């Protein structure tokens, strides 16, 4: 009987070791799953950023590769037409923060910033990186012009910037093999964009941290994506709370695992106690 009790005890220890091993595998698997989910969420945010930039660039191309715009904006300098069909329209329809039309010498013809028409380009707007983007925009196939776009520092805030050359196509009296000016579109990476991403793509607690700010202390694991200019100058960090499917799975399984272990312990202890002889009773070793 005592040998049987020792056997049950050894079995109990073996079971507990096995349960611990399985539980360890589950924990490691859940952590791996969470890391994978975080990496996928980072890819999603980067993809959304790229798509937002691509849409802005395509929009700039749509409104600059346009014979009527070349004639009326660049050469006739019709500010009313420009406001109604380019600058004002793009702001009203798409919420574009800056819409700026420049001639070939990069002199302002018409521009709007958040609904206010510009009298002159703000000091320091056309930074070296901005001018580099403009140079890339006119280095294109004028039969099928491609815009240039990137994330730049616009007056101290990160912004999506797209530049397209004003280009004419046949039939037109204007040259079709050159840029006649620039159309510049700027959208700040602000609450308007981030709020839409939170709402449409269920990205929890998404926000932009300034470049100089230290990440605040928060409960829960956070994911981040740093933003930088083409030269590498930091512009801030996008931060959000990704899903943790492994952690959720572990939370659901933990009560069952603990309950199972307790049942095994209770059953094994009951079996061991049942094998002990009662006090004062002689052990029967033989029937003879």
Image (cartoon, rainbow, N blue to C red):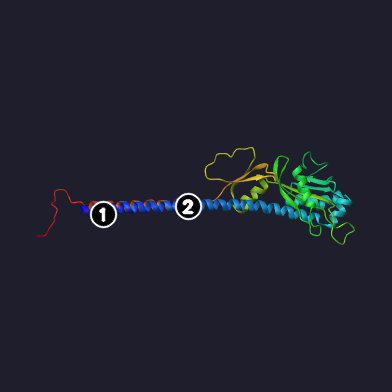
How far is the residue under mark 2 from the one under mark 1?
A: 34 Å
In the image, 93 versus 255, the foreground residue is: 255
Q: Residue at x 43, y 53 (%)?
A: 25
How packed is label 2: few (under 14 Cα within 10 Å), some, or many (20 or more)?
some
Q: Which mark is residue 7?
A: 1
Q: Position of residue 287 (x, y in %)?
A: 11, 60
Q: Name the residue carrying label 2.
A: 30
Relative placement, left or right, of 152 versus 223 is right
Q: Is residue 244 visible?
A: no
Expressed as whole percent of the image width and height from the top left, the position of residue 238 reads: 62, 45
Find residue 127 and report its horizontal and vertical position in percent.
Answer: 76, 42
> Residue 228 at x, y = what percent?
67, 44
Q: Quadrant of the N terminus?
A: bottom left
Q: Quadrant of residue 128?
A: top right
Secondary structure type for disc 2: helix
Q: Nearer the viewer, mark 2 or mark 1?
A: 1
Between disc 2 and disc 1, whose residue precedes? 1
Q: Is residue 237 left or right of residue 268?
A: right
**Residue at (71%, 39%) from the top-left corner?**
156
Residue 103 is tagged as: none
Q: Residue at x 71, y 54 (%)?
A: 55
Query: How many residues crowd mark 1 within 10 Å: few (<14), some (14–19), many (20+)?
Result: few
The answer to whether one can see residue 208 in this image is yes
Pick the residue in front: 144 or 122.
144
Of all residues shown, which one is farthest toward the bottom? 171
Please state which of residues 276 and 8 is positioned toward the viewer in this rendering. Answer: 8
Q: Secondary structure at mark 1?
A: helix
């Amino acid at each position: 009987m005592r040998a049987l009790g020792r056997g049950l005890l050894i079995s109990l220890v073996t079971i507990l070791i096995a349960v611990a091993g399985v539980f360890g595998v589950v924990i490691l698997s859940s952590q791996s799953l969470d890391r994978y989910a975080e990496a996928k969420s980072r890819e999603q945010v980067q993809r959304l950023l790229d798509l937002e930039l691509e849409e802005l660039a395509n929009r700039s191309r749509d409104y600059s590769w346009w014979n009527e715009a070349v004639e009326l904006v660049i050469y006739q300098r019709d500010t009313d037409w420009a406001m109604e069909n380019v600058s004002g329209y793009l702001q009203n329809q798409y919420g574009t923060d800056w819409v700026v039309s420049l001639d070939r010498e990069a002199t302002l013809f018409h521009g709007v910033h958040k609904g206010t028409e510009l009298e002159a380009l703000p000091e320091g707007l056309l930074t070296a990186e901005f001018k580099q983007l403009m140079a890339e925009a006119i280095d294109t196939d004028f039969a099928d012009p491609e815009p240039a776009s990137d994330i730049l520092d616009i007056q101290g805030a990160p912004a999506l910037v797209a530049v397209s050359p004003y280009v004419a196509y046949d039939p037109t009296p204007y040259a079709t093999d050159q840029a006649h000016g620039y159309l510049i579109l700027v959208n700040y990476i602000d609450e308007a964009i981030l709020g839409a991403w939170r709402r449409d793509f269920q990205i929890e607690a998404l926000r932009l941290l300034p470049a100089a700010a230290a990440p605040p202390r928060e409960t829960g694991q956070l994911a981040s994506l740093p933003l930088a200019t083409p030269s590498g100058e930091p512009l801030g960090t996008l931060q959000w709370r990704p899903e943790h499917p492994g952690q959720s799975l572990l939370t659901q399984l933990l009560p069952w695992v603990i309950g199972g272990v307790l049942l095994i312990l209770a059953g094994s202890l009951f079996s061991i106690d049942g094998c002990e002889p009662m006090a004062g009773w002689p052990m029967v070793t033989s029937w003879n």
